[in-house]
Amino acid sequence: MKNYMKIFLSLILMLSLNACATETQLIDNENDSTERTAALEGRDFEQASNSMIQDMLDMGTLSKPNGKPYILVISRIRNDTMQRIDVDELAKSIRIALMKSGKVRVTAFNEDAMVMASGQLRQSGEFNKANVRQSGSLAAPELSLSGKITQREFIVSGKKRIEYRFSMSITDLRNGLTLWEGEEKIKKLADKHAITW
């Protein structure tokens, strides 16, 4: 029995030392030179969002005549690719950059269920009315950001060419006019058997 216990403990020690031996490296986001994947990855979202945000700002689309920030709502961003991707990742990076620009403030009434539910607290005697949102106090959105991500694949000279297109629009909700539209294309060339989903 003692021999079995010694073997068992030696095995556990060896496995734990093996687990500690694997090396994990931190990747520098600014100088990431690791191999690219055929599928969409974080760098692609970053590239697309940075390019479109710069275009919005350069065009002056978000410069309100009175200098105050617009109230923006993030509408639907549709994933029309073969991948299960979280489009909120793209929306979040755009939202953060736009808020940092000082040109917009983002309303989350359509994303955070508590924004609308908090209005029901007015009817309850359990809550301090000083902290309860008053009727008519929500900031209505003036602009809406919507978009779509598409994917097309071709076989060219025995390689797989993958084209991703990020399309975004900003619409003025007061009159329905489109204030800005932008596209960013990301093209990749991979082995013809590369999986993109």
Image (spheres, rainbow, N blue to C red):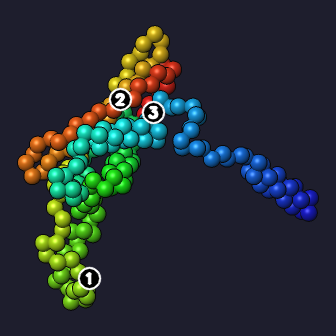
Q: Is mark 2 on a helix, strand or loop?
A: strand
Please report contact status of discs 2 and 1: CB closer than 8 Å, yes or no.
Answer: no
Frontmost of labels 1 and 3 is 1
Q: Is residue 78 visible?
A: no
Residue matched to label 3: 39
Label 3 packing within 10 angstroms: few (<14), some (14-19), many (20+): some
Frontmost of labels 2 and 3 is 2
* Position of residue 176 in the picture relative to residue 77 (left or right): left
* Position of residue 87 in the picture relative to residue 195 (left or right): left
Q: Position of residue 20 (x, y in %)?
A: 75, 52
User: Is tag 2's residue or tag 3's residue first in the polypeptide sequence?
Assistant: 3
The amino acid type, in three-letter code, at marker 3 is Ala
Q: Where is residue 150 in the image (x, y as percent from the top left)?
A: 31, 32
The answer to whether residue 76 is above or below residue 126 is above
Q: Where is residue 112 in the image (x, y as percent from the top left)?
A: 29, 63
The amino acid type, in three-letter code, at marker 2 is Lys
Separation of residues labelled 2 and 3 (CA atoms) = 14 Å
The residue under the point 51% across, 20% down is 191
Q: Is mark 3 on a helix, strand or loop?
A: loop
Separation of residues labelled 1 and 3 (CA atoms) = 47 Å
The amino acid type, in three-letter code, at marker 1 is Asn
User: Is tag 1's residue or tag 3's residue first in the polypeptide sequence?
Assistant: 3
Residue matched to label 2: 185
Residue matched to label 1: 131
Label 1 packing within 10 angstroms: few (<14), some (14-19), many (20+): few
The residue under the point 9% across, 52% down is 174
User: Is tag 2's residue or tag 1's residue first in the polypeptide sequence?
Assistant: 1
Say which quadrant the C terminus sits in.
Answer: top left
Separation of residues labelled 2 and 1 (CA atoms) = 47 Å
